[in-house]
Image (cartoon, rainbow, N blue to C red):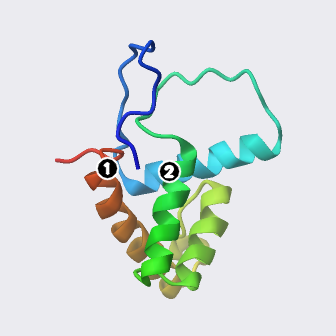
Amino acid sequence: MRNIYLSQFDQRETTPFESSEEAWFWYCLCESLKNERTHGHEAKTIRPCESSDIAIAVKKLLREGTIRPEHLKVLTKYGFEQVPPHPHFGDSLKICKLWKEALSFLEGLLRKKGIVYCL
């Protein structure tokens, strides 16, 4: 992955994500907007990556076996719903655990790339 994705002529400052969860929700929203063919939306916050870079990171974790298909299923379902699973809303503890595990692994990778803030 590249660290800076903006044109050399674009001098706007980028803002990394606070967490992998925020990055994942942003990726899913971008994909939803692509699928709806919504155009002309100017983002207020410029991110240090393209949405495809989040997908590439997840695919890398899958390929390495760091996360499993059941992690991806949970990430996809809740990511496109734009809400994390929670036992209070009837989600099982297993689903919540898969969500947290996947995002934890993703966060490490995204921090290394400068996509998520490094504290």
Residue 113: image tag: 1
Q: Secondary structure at mark 1?
A: loop
User: 109 or 103: which is nearer to us?
Assistant: 109
Q: Give the mark, 1 or 2, whose residue is nearer the N terminus.
A: 2
Q: Position of residue 42 (x, y in %)?
A: 62, 20
Hey, what amino acid is under mark 1? Lys
User: 83 or 72: which is nearer to us?
Assistant: 72
In the figure, 69 relative to 76: above or below?
Answer: below
**Label 1 crowding class (10 Å Cα cut-off): few <14, some 14-19, many 20+?**
some
Q: Residue drawn at (39%, 76%), measured in percent from left and top?
A: 101
Q: Are marks 1 and 2 in contact (CB under 8 Å)?
A: yes
The quadrant holding residue 66 is bottom left
**Position of residue 111 in the picture relative to residue 8 (left or right):** left
**Position of residue 46 in the picture relative to residue 78 (left or right):** left
Hey, what amino acid is under mark 2? Asp
Give the residue furthest to the right. 36
**Label 2 crowding class (10 Å Cα cut-off): few <14, some 14-19, many 20+?**
some
In the figure, 78 relative to 24: above or below?
Answer: below
Q: Position of residue 1 (x, y in %)?
A: 41, 50
The residue pinned by badge 2 equals 53
In the figure, 95 relative to 39: above or below?
Answer: below
The residues bearing labels 1 and 2 have C-alpha atoms spaced at a distance of: 10 Å
Q: Position of residue 38 (x, y in %)?
A: 79, 32
